[in-house]
Amino acid sequence: MSDSFRRAVFPGSFDPITRGHENILRRAAGLFDEVIVAIGVNQDKQGMFPLEHRMDWCRRTFADLDNVRVDAFEGLTVDYCHAQQAGWLLRGVRNGGDFEYERTIAQMTKHLDATLETMILFTDPEFAAISSSVVRDIAHHGGDVTRFVPDAVDLGQRGA
């Protein structure tokens, strides 16, 4: 692989993936040769939706993009990026609170791996209010979340 190959990792729980995540990734796909949607697995924390469903939703959401792949990982994100030979860490922000959090994470990432660059993309304004935690809360209470998640997401697959 040449030094000019640009591979980015877009890490998250994607529990579930939202239209905001989709917005960030679709824009990033044009900037990188490959983007890996990396679903973090924490054995101490159970997601609302099974990993298999989250991976399937992401694969189906981005099936039209040849340079996007979906994977799962455990451990430090910087270690995963290194194992994947990714030089970029992709993060999305919706608001100032997200930005402050992501800035802190980006600075810590630089301490852990000075060669890994973090790219922060701001979600388009129409998606700024959408977060996975709000979508989970609406779904938990029986509300309709179809406006907030990609068409590939079927919350009837909860399995939880």
Image (cartoon, grey):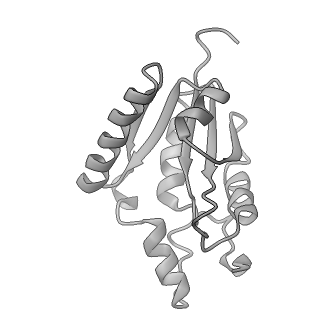
Q: Is residue 144 visible?
A: no
Image-based side of 59 in relation to 127, left or right: right
Please tell me which residue lies in front, 96 or 85: 85
Above or below residue 136? Residue 38 is: above
In x, y percent, where is residue 60?
73, 55
Looking at the image, which residue sits at the far front? 44
How many labels, in total? 0
Q: Residue at x 48, y 83 (%)?
A: 138
In x, y percent, where is residue 18?
53, 62
Snapshot quadrant of residue 30: top right
Q: Residue at x 53, y 34 (%)?
A: 78
Quadrant the N terminus occupies:
top right
In x, y percent, where is residue 62?
67, 48
Above or below residue 11? Residue 45 is: below
Q: Is residue 157 visible?
A: yes
Quadrant the C terminus occupies:
bottom right
Q: Residue at x 50, y 69 (%)?
A: 148
Snapshot quadrant of residue 8: top right
Looking at the image, which residue sits at the far bottom? 142
Q: Residue at x 26, y 47 (%)?
A: 100
In x, y percent, where is residue 84?
67, 29
Please tell me which residue lies in front, 8 or 62: 8
Above or below residue 41? Residue 8 is: above
Snapshot quadrant of residue 15: bottom right
